[in-house]
Structure formats: C-alpha cells, structure tokens
Image (spheres, rainbow, N blue to C red):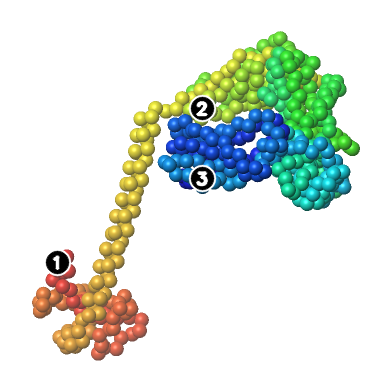
Amino acid sequence: MRHCHGPWSCSFWTCVFNVAEDLGTVWIPPGVTIVRLVRLVPSTVWYYGTPQGAQEVFEFTLKNIIQSNAGFYYCEYIRRGELSRSSDILELVVTGIYNEKPFLSADAGPQEISERNVTLLCDTQSSFDTFILCRGGNASFPQNCSHQDHSTFLISPMRPGHRRTYRCFGSLKHSSYLWSLPSDPLEFSIPLFLMVQKIWAQHGPPPQPSIWVVPGAVVSTGSDVTIFCRTLPGVTTVRLARLAPSTVWYDGTPQGAQEVFEFSLKNITQSNAGVYFCAYFNGSQWSRNSNNLELVITGVYNEKPFLIADSGPQEISERNVTLLCHTHSSFDIFILCRGGNVSYPQSCSRQDHSTFLISPVSPGNKRTYRCFGSHKKTSYLWSLPSDPVEFSIPRPPSHIVVWASVAAACFLLFLLFICLYWLCAKHRATNGETRRQVKYKRASPAMDMEEKHKYGDLEGIPPEDCRKVDTQAPAAEDTQEVTYAHLCQEVLRENMDPLPSSTTQDTSTQTCVYASLMLSQQESQT
C-alpha cells in the first residue's frame, strides 16, 4: 500500500483476487473532486467516483468478479480543474479461470531441505507457457508469487523450526492475469528435534535440564504451585518425577519449539511434598536428571513454635542477637526464615538445635523472622509457623545527619587551612635564606679589598674568640648597610672564601673568617 506523493498522482493497493472477490482501494490527496479508475487491458473501461470533503481514500467495489474484470488498471483524479498523472499500473489477477489443477512435487524430503536447495516441479497437462509459484497465503489469496516460463523452481534451504507452504498455477503469456486453479499445497516443516538430534550425535548426550518452582519451594498446605522444566527445543517428552517419599512421575508433550514446560499442582497437601527432578526424551534417548528440587509443605504438624529474642530492638543494632525457637514436640530440625509471609516464607536456614545467632540490623532496615519445627526423616514436612518477631531500627533524624555532615566538612576545611599555613611559612623561610645568599654574592671585589685592609689586623684573633661579632656597621651609600660578622670557616666554607691570614695555624684549630653582607635598608629594618 502506497500513499500519494504530491498533488499529481495517486496510488493503488496491489492485490491478487480470486473469482467472486471484491476490488480495491485508491489513495488520493485531499481536495480532489473526481477520481477515475481505468482498465486498459483487455479493453478500456472507466469507473468514476466523487470524494466527500477531505477524503483521501476512495474505494471502487467490484462485486462477484469474473475473468472479464481481470486486467491492468490505473487511477487518476481531477483537482482544481487539472487532471493528475496516472498512477502506477496494477495487474488484477483472477485465479481459477482454467479448470486444470497443476500438481506440485519436490525432489527432496523435509530433512534434506534443511541442508540444501530443493527443486519444485509444477506439472500440468495443458500447454501453459507461464508457471507461477506462490509461497504463503491460501488458495483464494496466494502471496509472494513469482512467474517464469518453465515449470521447475529452485527454493533455498529452510531453518529448523520454520514452515513453508507452496502452491503453483499455470497461465498464458498473452493473458498473464488469468490463472488456472491452484495446485494442492506442498508444505515443508523442519522439526527442531531433527537438528537437536544431529547436534547431540556430534557433541555427546543431551544436556541437563533445569528446574524451578513458583511461587517458592516452601508453601503452606492448600496452596497452588507451578514447577517449571527448561529443556532444549524440539524434545518429544518432558517428565517431572518425585523421588521421595514415593516415586511418582508426570509426563508432558511440548508444542513446537517450546523450551519451558510447566507442571501445575493445585491445592497441594502433604502427599505432594518431596524431592523432585525433571528429564526429557529427544526421540532416541533420555537426558540426564536435573538438580533436585525439595518442595516443602508447612502446617503439617499442628504445634506452633514460639520464637523469642535475648535482646530488644535497640540492642540488635549494636551486637549479634540470639533467637530461640521453643517447642514442646520432639522436633530434631529447627528452621528459621527471614522474610516472606506465613504462606510463603523465604530465606530459610536449618539446624539441629533451636538457637539461632543473627547479625546486627543496620538503621533504616527491618527484619521479620519466623521459625518452624520438623524431623530429619521427613525434612520436607514442617510445623505451623511461629508468630513473627520483627526488628526495625529507625534511621536517625534528618537534622542530626545534616549537622553531622556540616561538622565533618568544617573539620576538613580546618585541616586544609593548617596544611596551607605550614606550607606558606616553609616557603617564606626558604625564600629569605636564598635572598641573603644572593646579597652576599653581589658584594663588589673593591669593597672586599677595602674591608680586608681595614680589618686585616683581626685575622690573628685566636679560635676561641670565634663567637665574637663586630657590630661596626658604617652607613653605606644608596640606603645600603654593610655588616661584618666574625664567622667560623667550617660553617661558611661552602658559600665563601676565607680572608687571607698572616698567621699560620694548626690544621686542627678552627679557622675564623670575616664576611661582609650587604642588606638593603628595608631588609635591615625587617
């Protein structure tokens, strides 16, 4: 089906019609005043119609059509006094004109068509020179048809699990819109189990099925449950078997490519409890058994245990708590379930003593516990459930959480401030030391000679007076000061040269030197 493209064309719904069926639909743009349907071949015939309002689809109905209605059609319309272009050509085919019924056959069986191309032969006794093969549809409305001038058709392989239906017709080239009766349908259906068997033959025995139950594996007396078995597609039989307390099995037959098969058990009693597994048959051998599923029925024993805790709700948020499942009967198995409800308990654990240790409950969470009693020899039959014990720890008020978050943020900011202050102080100390070393380097050689002559007589001062400092500091020009320090050589040897000494000293004696430091007025004040 195609809609109109622009104001100058209309389009058809292309179909193949059987004798006595109706024709068809024309698509037009809005605002058209006249629509015309024209048959060109075998003779020219016109059909006129007047659309109503903004009608875009106009129908021409041909009742009880016969071979005279077959042929090539097109449509056109008048809008604003102008005639549109003609639509594409529609070939209206009528089947059943020739009474002979062709016979359609294949050169291969269903199994071979899944592996290779297959040839179909449309055999007739008449002198047809056109042969048509249709895939799908039915005898009155065949679909996906192809024409050719010989009677053999090559079709591609099929995938397992699919089905194809073919029919063929005969016709003549000079009136290709008139067909014979359809052949009987030829159907190809490739069962999945054929492919599955082939895979199993190549890769060993069938894989293990899986089993599960809904709403759960622990249910109360009188409930309904559904047990599911998942198998490979294409198996012929699925079996659900109960091992204990006695052997019972249920067989089912999957439909087509069904992979999940379900077994429903209604209004179950203690006779339905036990250990189940499932398996399947592929037509030649049985698969391995699935894992075991224990279906537990509660309420079989009328005694109702009593569940108590050794602490209150507040303490369970701080430490482990012990729960005691107390009964008067001689149960040798005790079950504690957390969650679910009376009919469908969940998250159950079993042990041979009646005390259970549970972990702390975090704020904002809630836990509900129930306990049951049972016997080891029939562990799938449980007593009535105890009354629930609930632990619910409320969350702290929201304003407390907000203030705690603000306090934590302030503390982190304080730590960050301390770290930044320490780094800045260390950076200043390093920069000050570097500046003083640079000033010393910048002292002029002329000044060094002048100082040497002026204070040359201090070179002979004994080592024990090394710690004396000459504070004489004559004012220097350009707002600079010169300070002389009497320093030990071994301390400053790395940064300055010692002044010449006229006195020969022992190498073991500490040598003292004079160094001149030039500081700016601003630095000296600092």
Instruction: Using residue 483 as the reference point, say whether residue 20 is left or right of it.
Output: right
In the image, residue 38 sits, relative to residue 510, either above or below, namely above
Q: Residues within 10 Å of mark 1 (few under 14, many from 20)?
A: few
- Do the residues bearing badges 2 and 3 touch, measured as CB atoms within 8 Å? no
Residue type for callout 1: Gln
The span from disc 2 to disc 1 (Cα, nearest Å) is: 69 Å
Of the 4 image quadrants, the one containing the N terminus is top right
- Do the residues bearing badges 2 and 1 touch, measured as CB atoms within 8 Å? no
In the image, residue 449 sits, relative to residue 384, either above or below, namely below
The residue lying toward the viewer, choosing from 152 and 7, is: 7
Q: Earlier in the sequence, mark 3 or mark 1?
A: 3
Of the 4 image quadrants, the one containing the C terminus is bottom left
Q: Pinpoint residue 474: horizontal percent, then vertical percent.
A: 11, 77
Residue type for callout 3: Ser
Front tag of 2 and 1: 2
At numbered mark 2, what does the secondary structure look like: helix, strand or loop?
loop
Q: Residues within 10 Å of mark 3 (few under 14, many from 20)?
A: many
At numbered mark 1, what does the secondary structure look like: helix, strand or loop?
helix
Residue type for callout 2: Asn
Q: Quadrant of residue 258?
A: top right
Q: Which mark is residue 365?
A: 2
Q: Quadrant of residue 91?
A: top right
Q: Which mark is residue 525?
A: 1
The residue lying toward the viewer, choosing from 111 and 118, is: 118
Provide the residue designation for mark 3: 9
In the image, residue 354 sits, relative to residue 170, either above or below, namely above
Q: Residues within 10 Å of mark 2 (few under 14, many from 20)?
A: few
